[in-house]
Amino acid sequence: MNKTKLLLDVLAGISYSLIIVGLFRSIQLWSPHKWTLITGMTIQIGIVIANLLYSFKIKRTPFTRIMKLSLFWLTIGVLCLKMSTLEYVKVRYREYPRFVKAYELYYKDKTNGYKKSYAIKVWENEVLSDDYNI
């Protein structure tokens, strides 16, 4: 096996896992999801550039499997970065329209402490009481 291909495969595996972890973190609304996505996507861009430079150097076609997977995961990462937290909340809590509306008001003006406390109060009254049967 070619050492360059092995190195690209290892780096691709690391970047795929970073993008997947970032995707799951963004779905769960955990805060550091953007950094894992950006790190994984940066490695992916480096893999694509290294793959193209290597193929021009040896005058052969690039490693197509790595290129296809890299472009696929780059697309997933970009789509995940473009979606805002508000969109995730709208999808995830669509059964609780009062909470979505309160969060939307808070999301538009995060400096207003009253809107934040209202969103938390609606969260406690609607979502938590339904989840834990309070």
Image (spheres, rainbow, N blue to C red):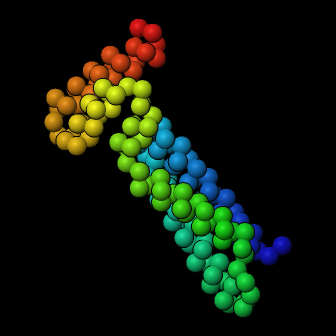
Which residue sits at x=69%, y=85%? 55
In the picture, which quadrant includes the N terminus? bottom right
65 and 49: which is toward the camera: 65
In this orientation, does residue 35 appear? no
Quarter of the image where one finds residue 51: bottom right
Q: Is 40 rendered above or below residue 68? A: above
Instruction: Using the rendered view, name the quadrant where residue 35 is placed.
Output: bottom left
Q: Considering only vertical position in the picture, is 61 above or below 21?
A: below
The structure residue drawn at horizontal position 56% and vertical position 72%, both measured from the top left corner, is: 46
**Which residue: 22% across, 25% down?**
118
The x and y percentages for residue 110 are 21, 40
The residue furthest right is 1
Measuring from the top left, give residue 5's x and y in whole percent.
Answer: 74, 73
x%, y% of residue 129?
40, 13
Residue 119 lies, in percent from the top left, at: 27, 28
Is residue 89 found left or right of 7 in the rendered image?
Answer: left
Position of residue 77 in the picture relative to residue 85 (left or right): right
Residue with the most extreme top position = 134
- Quadrant where the image shows the C terminus: top left
Residue at left offset 43%, top offset 55%: 81
Return the residue nearer the eye: 12 or 78.
Answer: 78
Which image quadrant for residue 54?
bottom right
Give the answer, above or below, for where 116 lies relative to 29: above
Residue 23 visible (yes or no) = yes
Residue 13 relative to residue 109: left or right? right
